[in-house]
């Protein structure tokens, strides 16, 4: 039975498919295609994080997001350390999310609350 995926997969997936007596049909992406597919994969993995039911599932999906982030950084000629440094700078300037602040709305002085 033919299954259509049309998505970026981890490097060892074709070998795993072969071990299951199936034949993978693959291609190598250009840099532009690769970036586009990595960004799609990031959204896919973020959705899987959101749909996680257990702590174990959550950690697995966060690891997948992390892998995609590392691949995007490498594609851009950067190291993950650069992204971490930028995150630290933003945290110092704008804060993190540890205070759990949920902004409901804003209003200008004189407006009704």
Image (cartoon, rainbow, N blue to C red):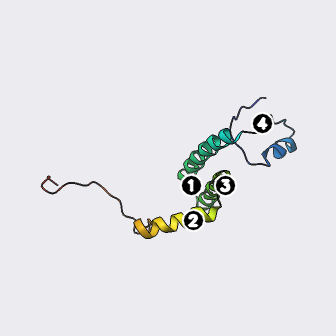
Q: Are marks 4 and 2 in contact (CB under 8 Å)?
A: no
Q: Sequence order check: which comes first, mark 1 or mark 3?
A: 1
Q: What residue is pinned by disc 2?
A: 84
Toward the viewer: 21 or 14? Answer: 14
Seen as rendered, the residue at the extreme front is: 77
Q: What residue is pinned by disc 4?
A: 27
**Distance CA(mark 1)–CA(mark 3):** 35 Å
Toward the viewer: 104 or 75? Answer: 75
**Distance CA(mark 4)–CA(mark 2):** 32 Å
Q: What residue is pinned by disc 3?
A: 77
Secondary structure state at the residue bearing disc 2 = helix
Q: Position of residue 6 (x, y in %)?
A: 69, 34
Secondary structure state at the residue bearing disc 1 = loop
Indicate which label's residue lies in the foreground, 3 or 4. Answer: 3
Q: Sequence order check: which comes first, mark 3 or mark 2?
A: 3
10 Å crowding of disc 2: few (<14), some (14-19), many (20+): few
Report which quarter residue 17 is drawn in.
top right
As drawn, the label of residue 53 is 1
């Amino acid at each position: 039975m033919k299954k259509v995926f049309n998505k970026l997969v981890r490097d060892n997936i074709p070998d795993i498919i072969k071990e299951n007596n199936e034949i993978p049909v693959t291609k190598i992406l250009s840099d532009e295609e690769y970036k586009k597919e990595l960004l799609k994969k990031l959204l896919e993995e973020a959705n899987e994080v959101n749909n996680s039911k257990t702590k174990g599932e959550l950690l697995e999906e966060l690891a997948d997001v992390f892998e995609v982030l590392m691949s995007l950084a490498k594609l851009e000629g950067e190291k993950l350390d650069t992204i971490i440094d930028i995150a630290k700078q933003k945290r110092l300037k704008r804060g993190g999310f540890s205070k759990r602040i949920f902004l409901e709305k804003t209003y200008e002085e004189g407006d009704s609350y």
